[in-house]
Image (cartoon, rainbow, N blue to C red):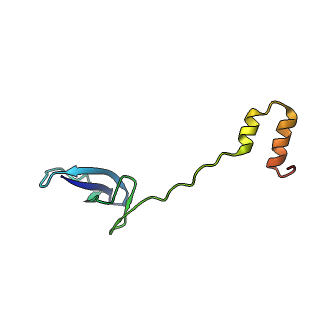
Amino acid sequence: MTRMALVETVTGKVINVIELEPNSDWQLPIGHEIWDAEDGGIGDTWDGVKFVKPPNPLPSLPDPDIAAWASATTLPELKSIIGRKLGLTQ
């Protein structure tokens, strides 16, 4: 069996990785192409020469004021958080 990447022709996006038997009668879906997927995986992009991995997303860092707002129990605490957000207090 051969590991192949199913690529959407218009976007170059790998939408699936499949294994094909040599001389298989499997029908390629319209608007797609297949490439040897030795280095490719779902979500990669085929640039016509090689597979390109998507960029790593930036980690989402929690906003400390959100946690403070959720745990605030008094009006002065809430005012302090708002003041910090607006740059009015430290």
Tell me: 77 left or right of 61.
right
Residue shown at the point (84%, 31%) measured from the top left: 74
Residue extending farthest left: 23
78 up-or-down from 12: above or below: above
Q: Point out residue 42 in the picture as x, y percentages from the top left corner.
A: 36, 52
The tally of labels here is 0
63 up-or-down from 76: above or below: below
Q: Point out residue 8 in the picture as x, y percentages from the top left corner.
A: 33, 56
84 up-or-down from 40: above or below: above
Residue shown at the point (38%, 60%) measured from the top left: 45
Q: Point out residue 34 in the picture as x, y percentages from the top left corner.
A: 26, 58
Residue shown at the point (33%, 58%) measured from the top left: 40
Residue extending farthest bottom: 49
Tell me: 35 left or right of 70.
left
Residue shown at the point (32%, 60%) measured from the top left: 39
Quadrant hosting residue 10: bottom left
Residue extending farthest top: 73
